[in-house]
Amino acid sequence: MAAAGAVACGQAAVGPHQAASAPLEQVDATAAPDLRPYVGESYAAFAAAPAMQRYSLDGLGLPGAEQARFRHSMTNSAPALLARGGGAEALVFSGCAPSGCLEGLSVVAVDVGTGEVFVGVSDSGGAAQLVPNDRLEALLRLTSPSQTWDDPVRPSAQRSAAP
């Protein structure tokens, strides 16, 4: 009976089984890309790059209303910078609404090591984490002048803090 079961399952062969090789298409496609070349770029230029489309608002799966809110609050974007702290490092994009950051602010942080992302917007509708990520939120708070994710470090502040 055991022999009949082994034959039915294709296990009747004697000796070691042949290893099944994974096709090349199954290589981890979610590995973090090299983000360092995008330091100094705008979020729009970054998200439009063919290799970075997964970080576009569509690629992140944000609904239309949230995309419109984000875009309005990212109208005047600052150049991206690398934020480091607490063992984390992220490429950070931020921007403000047309009349300034008090009207609205958007932020995107992409973890350099993992490729994970945080997206937030703060405006008259309140502060919302559109794509939450606890680790990146902690990094944004750590590097923020006011210790909040919706007041990210800006390039001019980073330069003036450098020795």
Image (tube, helix red, strand yellow):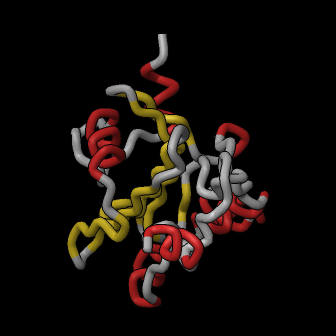
Residue 17 is left or right of residue 104, and the answer is right
- State the residue at coordinates (47%, 29%): 158
Q: Nearer the viewer, residue 4 or 15?
A: 4
Assign the N terminus to one quadrant of the image.
bottom left
Q: Position of residue 81 (x, y in %)?
A: 55, 39
User: Where 144 sits versus 71, above or below?
Assistant: above
**Any part of residue 154 in sight:** yes
Q: Nearer the viewer, residue 157 or 131?
A: 131
Residue 71 in view in this figure: no
Horizontal relation, residue 23 to residue 157: left or right: right
**Quadrant in which residue 85 is drawn:** top left
- In this view, the residue farthest toward the bottom is 64
- Position of 50 with respect to 112 (left or right) is right
Residue at (52, 25) in percent of width and height? 159
Where residue 8 sits in the image (x, y, percent)?
56, 78
Q: Position of residue 149 (x, y in %)?
A: 29, 50
Q: Is residue 119 above or below residue 5?
A: above
Give the residue at x 59% y 56%. Answer: 30
